[in-house]
Amino acid sequence: MTLTPPPEILRAPLVVEFPFTRSLGPVQSAFLTGLRERTVLGVRTEAGRILVPPVECDPETAAELRELVEVDATGTVTTWAWNPEPRRGQPLATPFAWVLVRLDGADTALLHALDAPGPDAVRTGMRVRIRWAADRTGAITDIACFEPYEGDAAGTEPVPHTGQFDAPVTGIVAEARLDYTYSPGRAQTRYLRDLSERRTVGERCPSCAKVYVPPRGACPTCGVATTDRVEVGPRGTVTTYCIVNIKAKNLDIEVPYVYAHIALDGAGLALHGRIGGIPYDQVRMGLRVEPVWSEDGRYPDHYRPTGEPDADYDTYKELL
């Protein structure tokens, strides 16, 4: 008996990374500017509770909160978890504990890192204090981490604070990053292999007859497996599009450029693709396009006009 070897399992690293930019209201601005000045601010709720980190609205009444107070830089661990393998961008490069710390004077806990030699050195109820970063810019990272502290709680009441500082921080940029190892399933593995042969092959639902490109392995509408393979394109029609004016990191494409939904001939829904070979302000709905393959021929790098007359709206309106 001859055994057929299993198909190669495709795997590839996938990184989703982008800078998240946001403006700050008066409470968050005061909190982050305070960290820059080695001052920890909380906010008092209508019931008199002190929230650290502070929030703009009372979580119980939804009332606007503006009464800022200063709390101590020492506190108590309320719960923790050991992190044996720190990852890129985390507060410490050596193993540490994630801790929730209720600072003295606060009623809620702040999440941060605790620098400790090992998990045996960490316990709920232990006393800690802030270790300030040497260079502070007005971010949560101005707290470099927490460290063990032998002193008891001072028992002092939170001190009212105006929240006023010189050069207040009004906005932040948070670098978001997710690292994956992506492994496609049966349908997309076959789809990718077909692309390497410069063929675009979808799968047809046996119930509604819609051809999915890229294939999904099952019809999300009918809930049945899609096994009938159908080659579509290579030409298609722009159904809708957007003009991109922000240059993406590590993407060597000059802005502005056009990113579009393209309904390949024979497909039951549109896929995404970049439009090239035409000025961005001349791209339009109904434009007929064809693929321009990457240098290694593994996938369409972008789509360009075919020179055909534009498609009639009625031919693609159901694919918008």
Image: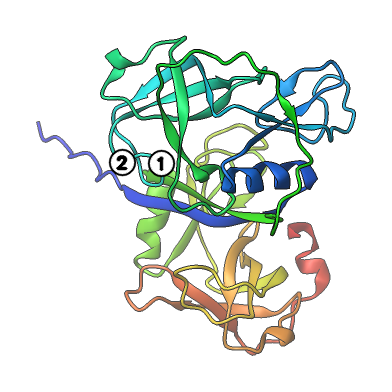
Label 2 neighbourhood size at 10 Å, few (<14), some (14-19), many (20+)? few
Residue 209 visible in the picture: no
Residue 237 at what x, y percent from top left? Answer: 67, 72
Its colouring scheme is rainbow
Q: CA distance from mark 1 to mark 2?
A: 7 Å
Q: Report whether 51 appears left or right of 124.
A: right
Give SS at disc 1: loop
> In the image, what residue type sits under mark 1?
Gln
Q: Residue at x 64, y 38 (%)?
A: 207
The image quarter in which residue 157 lies: top right
Q: In the rendering, at what x and y percent does residue 228 appear?
A: 49, 46
- Look at the picture and state if 286 lies above or below 103: below
Query: Percent position (x, y) of residue 31?
Result: 67, 41
Q: Nearer the viewer, residue 289 or 14?
A: 14
Q: Residue at x 64, y 60 (%)?
A: 270
* Disc 1 to disc 2: CB gap under 8 Å: yes
Q: Nearer the viewer, residue 218 or 275?
A: 275
Check disc 2 and give the amino acid type: Ala
In the image, is residue 313 above or below residue 212? Answer: below
How packed mark 1 is, by other alpha carbons closer than 10 Å (few <14, some 14-19, many 20 or more), is: few
Furthest residue toward left: 1
The residue wearing badge 2 is 93
Q: Which mark is residue 90?
A: 1
